[in-house]
Image: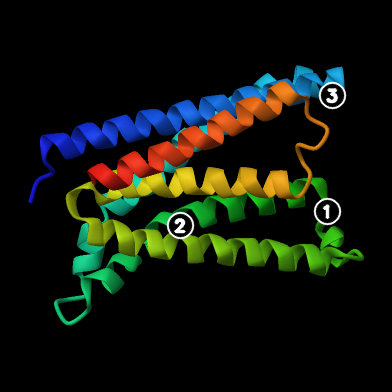
Amino acid sequence: MPATAPARAGAVAGIALCLAGVALCGRAGRLRERAGTSARASRFGLGLTLCVLSGVLSASANLGFEFGEPVARAFGPETHPVLASMARWLPVYWGGASVVLVFSVVQISRRREWGLLRAPGAAREIGWSLLAAALLVLGLLPYGMGAHLMGPMGTSVGFAVTTAGSLLVANLMGLWLGEWREAPPAARGWLRAGLLTLVVAVIVLAARA
């Protein structure tokens, strides 16, 4: 069943609020960096630009999930649609993993740094990397199930809610770990405004889905 006009309008409003929340959090980060060393502050703009570009490109994974419905149907009617939908991630992330793997092998070989993999502490760092990868997958699987259950607006509203939730958790952890302890009051104020906007965005998206 196609999404209704109010549902589409609500999704657009929710996504706009998500963007506003991101902008507010970005402003908070800018003020925090300005209060630090000038060297770090001078590169904040470049870092923010790259992060925005990364965020825009990461949405391509969601497009892959959206248009990967034939992959899920290939499992046949005997497989529950929610479970079959998880198979859509395979071509999306195998493609990304292959690019990263090839790039890493080329860079390590060019710099002749394979010995670093046997350096003290390397096993621990590799373990943390594998744990991060596992958590990424575990975070995406529920999203894929939820997007399927939400119907036509699933991959639009669901992805926006997932992204906003990630931003909320990441910034709240930063506050909890003291990342913003030395930030000026103005920066913390902008951050609180950004987090509140993200919360409202999630509520709007959930109400209008």
Q: Amino acid at mark 2?
A: Tyr
How far, Cα to Cα, is label 2 from label 3?
37 Å
How many residues crowd around disc 2 within 10 Å: few (fewer than 14), some, or many (20 or more)?
some
Left or right of 193: which side holds 150?
Answer: left
**According to the image, label 1 marks what residue?**
113
The answer to whether residue 88 shows anywhere in this view is no
Residue extending furthest right?
120
Left or right of 183: which side holds 15?
Answer: left
Could you tell me which secondary element the residue under label 3 belongs to? loop
Q: Amino acid at mark 3?
A: Gly
**The quarter of the displayed image where residue 84 is located:** bottom left
Q: Are marks 1 and 2 in contact (CB under 8 Å)?
A: no
Point 84% across, 24% down: residue:
36
Left or right of 106: which side holds 134?
Answer: left
Expressed as whole percent of the image width and height from the top left, the position of residue 164 reads 47, 43
Q: In front here: 31 or 49?
A: 31
Could you tell me which secondary element the residue under label 2 belongs to? helix
**According to the image, label 2 marks what residue?**
93
Point 47% across, 37% down: residue:
198
| Residue 36 circle label | 3
Expressed as whole percent of the image width and height from the top left, the position of residue 75 reads 22, 75
Could you tell me which secondary element the residue under label 1 belongs to? loop
How many residues crowd around disc 1 within 10 Å: few (fewer than 14), some, or many (20 or more)?
few
Q: Are marks 3 and 1 in contact (CB under 8 Å)?
A: no
The answer to whether residue 41 shows anywhere in this view is yes
Q: In front here: 99 or 200?
A: 200
Snapshot colouring: rainbow
Expressed as whole percent of the image width and height from the top left, the position of residue 115 reads 86, 61
Q: Amino acid at mark 1?
A: Glu
